[in-house]
């Protein structure tokens, strides 16, 4: 489960450098995200532009990560690919997350 | 990612058959093997993504619930016809509770309250498939559904 974190001002941008977040990798994803976000404060943007496939376990893991951040910090998402976007839309989770069309500047060339 | 998992192209043209162990990694590798075949790569991208999602949900449910107490195999048969992809999935795990499919209602979402982290699987299967059917035959669970892989999602 490769997650690449980059600090941009008071914002932590995490790029999921993998093509799927599924039942086989959901727990690992959740644990890695907790580690990465534990010592930071402020906004967290999770860039999913490389993720082609996310199932309901992956969705549950993303929700769990947001809940673990607590009420003060919001998890934002960027770069949803069509199938991933469909999962968020059908489950109405697109109303819960702040979703950006593209990753914040600089992230796309990082890593 | 290399997939050594053999996909059987028999018995008829347009049909795929795959047997996998009932565990999450095998489900991932099995889906990658199936969706890497020329037959499924020929589908329009949207229908293909939806098919992989619904199959993933069905297979992961079997791993999590039917094989909660013992291990076993899952047999997947996919047949592509002009109306779409007909999926048949068999396992030898525990039967569905009360012998029928879960309802798959989406839990209410309150962004300020306690958000659900699960319970999306059957909702997605029911939303995205047609002719959904479940039968218990002897010691086997038989699940079948049809996926409209030609058209775009109506929702």
Image (spheres, coloured by chain):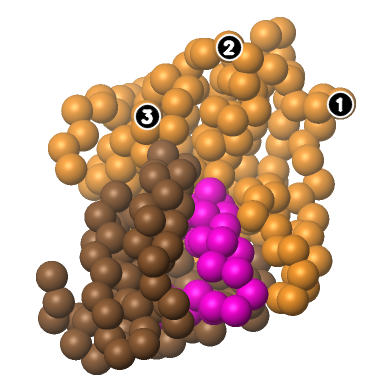
Chain colours: A brown, B orange
Is residue B75 placed above or below B105 in the rendered structure?
above
Q: Residue at x 64, y 55 (%)?
A: B117
Q: Quadrant of the N terminus of chain B?
A: top left
Is residue A45 placed above or below B96 in the rendered structure?
below
Sequence-wise, which precedes: disc 3 or disc 1? 3
Q: Which image quadrant for residue A20? A: bottom left
Q: Position of residue B33 (x, y in %)?
A: 28, 38
Q: Is residue B51 left or right of residue A88?
A: left
Circle 2 chain: B
Q: Quadrant of the C terminus of chain B?
A: bottom right
Q: Is residue B81 left or right of residue B105?
A: left
Q: Residue B92, can we see it?
A: yes
Is residue A72 placed above or below B49 in the rendered structure?
below
Q: Residue at x 52, y 13 (%)?
A: B71
Sequence-wise, which precedes: disc 2 or disc 3? 3
Spatial distance from mark 3 to mark 1, Cα to Cα? 28 Å
Q: Residue furthest front?
A: A39
Badge 2 marks a residue whose secondary structure is loop
Q: Which residue is mark 2?
A: B70
Q: Which image quadrant for residue B45? A: bottom left
Question: Mark 1 Cα within 10 Å, few/some/many (few <14, many 20+)?
Answer: few
Q: Which residues are magenta?
A: A52-81
Of residues B44 and B58, the one nearer the viewer is B58
Q: Residue at x 80, y 66 (%)?
A: B108
Q: Which residue is mark 1?
A: B98
Circle 1 chain: B
């Amino acid at each position: 489960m490769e997650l690449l974190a980059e600090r941009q001002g008071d914002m932590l941008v995490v790029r999921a450098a993998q093509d799927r977040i599924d039942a086989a990798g959901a727990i690992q994803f959740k644990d890695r995200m907790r580690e990465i976000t534990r010592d930071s404060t402020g906004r967290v943007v999770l860039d999913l532009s490389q993720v082609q496939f996310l199932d309901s376990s992956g969705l549950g893991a993303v929700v769990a990560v947001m809940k673990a951040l607590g009420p003060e910090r919001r998890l934002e998402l960027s770069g949803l690919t069509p199938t991933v976007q469909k999962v968020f839309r059908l489950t109405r989770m697109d109303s819960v997350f702040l979703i950006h069309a593209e990753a914040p500047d600089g992230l796309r060339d990082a890593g | 990612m290399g997939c050594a998992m053999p996909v059987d192209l028999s018995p008829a043209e347009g049909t795929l058959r795959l047997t996998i162990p009932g565990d999450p990694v095998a489900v991932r590798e099995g889906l990658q093997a199936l969706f890497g075949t020329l037959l499924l790569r020929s589908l329009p991208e949207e229908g293909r993504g939806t098919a992989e999602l619904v199959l993933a949900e069905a297979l992961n449910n079997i791993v999590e619930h039917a094989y909660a107490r013992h291990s076993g195999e899952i047999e997947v048969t996919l047949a592509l016809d002009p109306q779409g992809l007909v999926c048949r999935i068999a396992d030898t795990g525990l039967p569905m509770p009360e012998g029928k499919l879960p309802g798959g209602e989406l839990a209410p979402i309150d962004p300020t309250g306690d958000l659900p982290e699960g319970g999306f699987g059957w909702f997605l299967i029911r939303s995205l498939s047609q002719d959904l059917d479940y039968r218990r035959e002897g010691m086997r669970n038989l699940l079948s559904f049809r996926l409209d892989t030609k058209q775009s999602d109506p929702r």
